[in-house]
Image: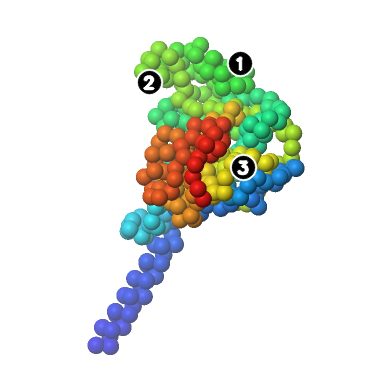
């Protein structure tokens, strides 16, 4: 009997050790978990600030980590609102997590510059932006360019012809035929490289060539005021809309009208609000934090936010200018 009891104890210890090992050992996929909405008031400093009105602007973060072996075996152990994302969606071929960390840090720095430029321009300030290339925002997964280009790349020429704006890039690609090879000169992480890819037909327009990427203007930006933004270790471009709203608030525009206003969305240099990832988790985080309204990119992002919103008000926006108008005309009482 004692031997049997000892065996049970041994099996129990082994079982606990195995479960612990499976819990701490990372698996191949990633998981997005809801974070929290956090005010920007202590994170953004603007020269000559004169904050307007009550209320705050909030950004919303998402926790990203590897799944554990145990979570792979028992998915019900994942936190509420978590989404598992395959590794290849976050780490393009030939990259690792250190590369991703560097890219998200660069994305954050650019987001801060662009948000500052967009906000100050909307307030009537003179902002200088010198075009330096076409910034890759996203790459379709089913095109040849997915094997070579990455978000964050800056395309500066096509077959030796300078393409310092997205229009330049589109014009050069349009001179080819679908299936033609092209050589792109790209800046990546401060280094210049030559990449080869192939054009593909535009869906619905089989004679019009594209390479299957979304681009924005990359530029050297000179601001008329000092703007400092510090979110610590948070990376990525999706707080751009929130940054621009907070800069406007700091310079006297009453964007909050006494409310707790959360926002997510990448800003383009022309003020367009671009789609972002993790909207399901961000909406849950904003709702749990108790904000009054959540601004999100229009389209699929807005539909995803509404599916998780419950009683949280969702405001879909296509541009920074529209965000300002919708907040100004809102009759919501907070």
Q: Are marks 1 and 3 in contact (CB under 8 Å)?
A: no
Question: What residue did someone put label 3 on?
Answer: 254
Give the SS element for disc 3. loop
Q: Name the element at disc 2.
A: loop
Marks 2,1: beta carbons within 8 A = no
Determine whether, in the image, residue 30 is placed left or right of residue 183.
left
Q: Which mark is residue 161?
A: 1
How many numbered discs sit on the rendered protein?
Answer: 3
Q: Disc 3 to disc 2, how far (Cα)?
A: 43 Å
Residue in view at x 44 percent, y 62 percent: 24
Image quarter of the N terminus: bottom left
Q: Is residue 253 something one can see in this rendering?
A: yes
Q: Residues within 10 Å of mark 1 (few under 14, many from 20)?
A: some
178 vs 276, nearest the viewer: 276
Name the residue that disc number 2 marks: 203
- Give the number of the mark in front: 2 or 1: 2
Q: Is residue 317 left or right of residue 256?
A: left
Camera-side mark, 3 or 2: 3
Q: Is 33 situated above or below 197?
A: below
Q: Is residue 325 left or right of residue 45?
A: left
């Amino acid at each position: 009997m004692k031997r049997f009891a000892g065996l049970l104890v041994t099996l129990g210890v082994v079982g606990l050790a195995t479960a612990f090992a499976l819990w701490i050992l990372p698996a191949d996929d990633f998981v997005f978990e809801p974070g929290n909405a956090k005010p920007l008031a202590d994170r953004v400093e603007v020269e000559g600030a004169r904050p307007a009105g009550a209320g705050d602007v909030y950004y919303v973060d998402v926790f990203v980590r590897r799944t554990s072996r145990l979570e792979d075996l028992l998915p019900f152990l994942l936190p509420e609102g978590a989404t598992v994302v395959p590794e290849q969606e976050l780490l393009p071929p030939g990259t690792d997590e250190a590369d991703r960390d560097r890219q998200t840090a660069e994305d954050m720095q650019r987001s801060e510059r662009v948000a500052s430029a967009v906000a100050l321009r909307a307030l009537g300030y003179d902002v200088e932006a010198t075009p330096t290339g076409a910034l890759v925002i996203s790459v379709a997964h089913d095109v040849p360019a997915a094997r070579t280009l990455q978000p964050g790349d800056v395309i500066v020429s096509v077959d030796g012809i300078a393409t310092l704006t997205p229009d330049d890039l589109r014009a050069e690609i349009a001179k080819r035929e679908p299936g033609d090879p092209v050589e792109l000169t790209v800046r990546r992480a401060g280094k210049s490289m030559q990449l080869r890819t192939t054009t593909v037909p535009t869906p619905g327009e089989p004679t019009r060539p594209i390479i299957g990427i979304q681009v924005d203007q990359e530029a050297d930006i000179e601001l008329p005021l000092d703007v400092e933004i510090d979110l610590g270790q948070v990376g990525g471009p999706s707080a751009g809309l929130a940054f621009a709203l907070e800069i406007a608030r700091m310079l006297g525009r009453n964007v909050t009208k006494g409310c707790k206003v959360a926002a997510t969305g990448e800003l383009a240099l022309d003020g367009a609000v671009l789609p972002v990832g993790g909207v399901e988790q961000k909406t849950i985080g904003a709702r749990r934090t108790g904000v009054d309204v959540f601004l999100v990119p229009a389209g699929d992002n807005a539909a995803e936010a509404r599916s998780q919103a419950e009683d949280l008000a969702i405001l879909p926006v296509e541009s920074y200018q529209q965000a300002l108008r919708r907040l100004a005309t809102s009759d919501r009482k907070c």
